[in-house]
Amino acid sequence: MKRIFSSNSYFYFLLIIILFPIIFFPISSDISIFALGGKTIAQGGNIYADYLDLKPPMIFIIYAFLYKTIGISEIALRSFDFVIQMFTAILIFRFVKDYFENKIAAIFSAIAYSLSYSTLSYSQTLNPESFVGLIIMSVLFLMNKNSINTLLKYFIIGVLLGFVASMKFTMAIVPFCIIFFDLFIKKNEKKGLF
């Protein structure tokens, strides 16, 4: 583990520099809605009864967890976003490097992701989609690992994909994309992801 971080420390530092500005993004109206819904749940209220919104409950549950653990101040939420995006970029790097066996492509993939996220409008960050990248990369990373017990791996993947679908209704298509990837993209290769 030490070798992974030491051999790529300059690269990780570059990702930190690219993603660092998101810590200073202001809070958007969507984030305020999520934070207030999370605060309501954290204080014992019920979503859809004490706080009304059309979004699925998982995003409010995430914000309730954030309210309980780090608070919902601007800097706390944006720092959490920074950590999530940093881990997402690192998982992109690791997955592309392991799956395609190309470190240069992995570096460019992680940098492209980091640049695309940090150049989004502040109102487009820290939304349900902001969390999905980390979860999807975790799923792909797990799918590519053969050392994990298959039943446990499927269970974890199912829970993660269910989590994605329960964060935003339109994200329910993601599990089908994962199946498509495994069935059709990997079809002509020697080993499938599963």
Image (tube, helix red, strand yellow):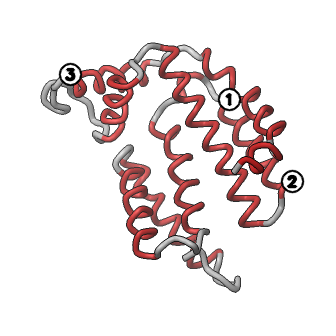
Element under disc 1: helix
Element under disc 3: loop
In 3D space, how far apart are the residues under numbered discs 2 and 3 (Cα atoms)?
48 Å
- Which image quarter: residue 192? bottom right
Q: Do the residues bearing badges 2 and 3 touch, measured as CB atoms within 8 Å? A: no
* Residue linked to disc 2: 104
> For the residue marked with disc 3, what is the amino acid?
Gln
Mark 1 nearby-residue class (10 Å; few <14, some 14–19, many ≥20): many
* Residue linked to disc 3: 43
In 3D space, how far apart are the residues under numbered discs 3 and 1 (Cα atoms)?
32 Å
Q: Mark 2 or mark 1, which is nearer the start of the sequence?
A: 2
Q: Is residue 152 above or below residue 192?
A: above
Q: Is residue 61 left or right of residue 179?
A: left
> For the residue marked with disc 1, what is the amino acid?
Ser
* Residue linked to disc 1: 118
- Residue displayed at 39% across by 18% down: 71
Q: Do the residues bearing badges 3 and 1 touch, measured as CB atoms within 8 Å? A: no
